Amino acid sequence: MLRRVAAVTMVRNGGEMLRRWVDYYGGQLGKDNIFVFFDGQDQVPPPFTEGCQVHVLPRTDGNVAEADRARAALLSAVASELLGRYDFVIGTDIDEFIVPDPAKWISLPEYLSGIDTDGCVAFSPLGCDVVQNVECEAALDSSRPVLAQRSFALLSTRYTKASILCAATAGNGSAKPQWGSGFHRVRGANLHILKDLYLFHFGCANAPDVLARQSDADLGSRGWSRHLRKRGRLFKLVSRLHVRSWNTWVPRARRLQSFLRPPYAWNKPAMLGLRILVRIPERFSRIV
């Protein structure tokens, strides 16, 4: 019997990436099991969100750090309530897609139904930061899957996140799990990095989108400029790095991140500062 899985996100001005998020998680879990919170009452839910659990909230105040903390607190409270009805709750940004290896698994619910949850509050996929190589890859075509158009990913500790909360341990009388900002950790708890499960981050998958956001005055006023400049530098980095083997480096990265922790955050993964660029296998190209 498949376990029950919900997905939650909070979004402002989601556009095309929100459509991809709804299409993917709605197709995997059923649209009635995905919860979309719009940040600001000036936001109008697009027609493709029909069938989802949609909530339009007052705009989150503060700069990027303050707003991230407020969103994490809100979605943690939502997840705690949902864990009374679901076996797992997935929390991601709209540019993050959790994908089981299609060589071994049919769907996300099938994958999660097969894992051992004993004693674990939070689970994590392995982070894969998909970055456009501007020297050989064109701008994204919205009519085609992203991974049919992008071939490279950085194996990233930043996107190895505590994105999946589990009801089996969250409901055992202990404190409710609380996501940190951006779902990067669960406060006071470790995370377990799962085999054959990946988080593909598409925030740098399309250089024109990043450049457009760099000139967004609203984002700039809320402290996003430095973060967007860092994203912009990744395009040059990816064009220079040697491309490594997925089959060799994915297991290595998972082992490193499972045992290494930075001294300032024992419940976040580390990887010795390695910059490992891999070629994404073709079997992922039709999924998202």
Image: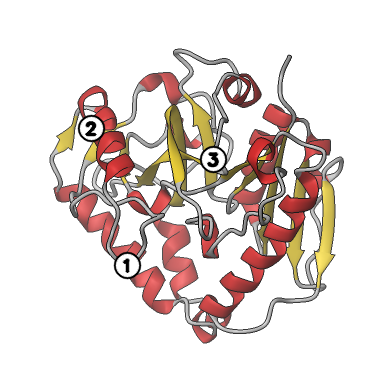
Q: CA distance from mark 2 to mark 1?
A: 23 Å
Which residue does the numbered mark 1 point to in the structure image? 264
Which residue does the numbered mark 2 point to in the structure image? 252
Label 2–label 3 contact, CB within 8 A = no
Q: Residue 40, image x and y in percent?
A: 76, 72
Q: CA distance from mark 3 to mark 1?
A: 27 Å
Q: Going from the N terminus, do you reach mark 2 or mark 1 first? A: 2
Instruction: Name the colour scheme.
Output: secondary structure
Residue drawn at x 33%, y 30% is 280
Amino acid on which disc 1 is placed: Tyr
Residue drawn at x 46%, y 45% is 191
Image side of residue 53 versus residue 149, left or right: right
Which residue does the numbered mark 3 point to in the structure image? 97
- Looking at the picture, tell me which residue is in the foreground, 218 or 10: 10
Amino acid on which disc 2 is placed: Arg
Residue drawn at x 18%, y 49% is 274
Relative to 184, residue 47 above or below: above
Label 2–label 1 contact, CB within 8 A = no
Q: Quadrant of residue 122?
A: top right
Q: Quadrant of residue 22?
A: top right
Q: Quadrant of residue 97?
A: top right
| Disc 1 secondary structure class | loop
| Disc 2 secondary structure class | helix
Image side of residue 184 versus residue 43, left or right: left
